[in-house]
Amino acid sequence: MDLEFKKISEADYSQLIEFDTRYMILESPLTQDSAPPPLKIEEIVTAKNRRDDLFWIWSNEELVGYYWLEYREDCLFLSAIVVASSFRNKKIGHTIMKLMDDICDKRGIKKSALAVSPDNHPALFLYMKHGYEKKRLRENYFGPSYPGKNRFWFEKLH
Ligand SMILES: CC(C)(COP(=O)(O)OP(=O)(O)OC[C@H]1O[C@@H](n2cnc3c(N)ncnc32)[C@H](O)[C@@H]1OP(=O)(O)O)[C@@H](O)C(=O)NCCC(=O)NCCS
């Protein structure tokens, strides 16, 4: 599958929120109890100001997903990867995992990390296949306003 990455710009923010709500919350393996809170515009603005990588994933003129990478002091952090339901299990996730490895290699980043819901089996499988190791459970990951939404913290050394 040929993939093309296009930078998410300010004009795309509402489309990004719609895409994320649809495919991360409504059409995902997560239950209502574990799904993340809806993405907010302020989070996207903060990410852009921080110079995170926020890219649409296109394939043959179709929007198939997006990814969001944050360059933290101690690691490359995968803030989000979301693939449209009808394009899942076609190795797009594998491609983004490899992209993260390449970024770490090129920039000399020694660690990458991500957070994943314990009931998100496709995502858990993908991350473990790419060498990510579970470090701990972070309870109430999204803060006290969203109790019970826990996440495993995964890391990979490069
Ligand atoms: C997680 C997600 C990004 C993976 O993207 P993808 O393009 O479908 O991933 P890939 O096709 O590269 O790989 C998925 C792997 O999961 C496996 N898988 C799929 N369903 C599974 C299940 N129920 N249990 C275990 N493994 C499963 C597939 O077999 C595949 O591995 P393989 O190619 O080695 O066989 C995608 O499922 C998605 O967008 N989910 C909703 C949003 C989300 O949960 N994002 C991650 C938040 S941490």
Image (tube, helix red, strand yellow):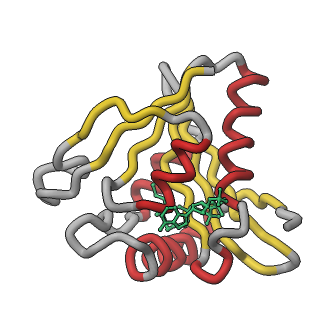
Residue 6 shows in this picture: yes
- Ligand 1: quadrant of the figure: bottom right
* Above or below, comparing residue 52 to residue 149 in the picture: above
Q: In which quarter of the image is the C terminus?
A: top right
Q: In which quarter of the image is the N terminus?
A: bottom right
- Residue displayed at 43% across by 74% down: 28
- Residue displayed at 78% across by 58% down: 5
Quadrant of residue 51 in the image?
top right
* Above or below, comparing residue 50 to residue 74 in the picture: below
Q: Position of residue 26 (x, y in %)?
A: 40, 81
Q: Where is residue 127 in the image (x, y as percent from the top left)?
A: 53, 45
Q: Nearer the viewer, residue 69 or 135?
A: 135
Residue 49 shows in this picture: no
Quadrant of residue 130 in the image?
top right
Q: Which of 20 and 130 is in front in this view?
A: 130
- Residue displayed at 45% across by 70% down: 24
- Residue displayed at 32% across by 63% down: 36
Q: Which of 135 and 25 is in front in this view?
A: 135
Quadrant of residue 104 in the image?
top right
Left or right for 46, reference 109: left
Left or right for 115, reference 125: left
Q: Position of residue 107 (x, y in %)?
A: 73, 21
Q: Where is residue 3 in the image (x, y as percent from the top left)?
A: 83, 63
Q: Which of 14 and 35 is in front in this view?
A: 35
Q: Please tell me how many numbered marks the rendered image carries.
A: 0
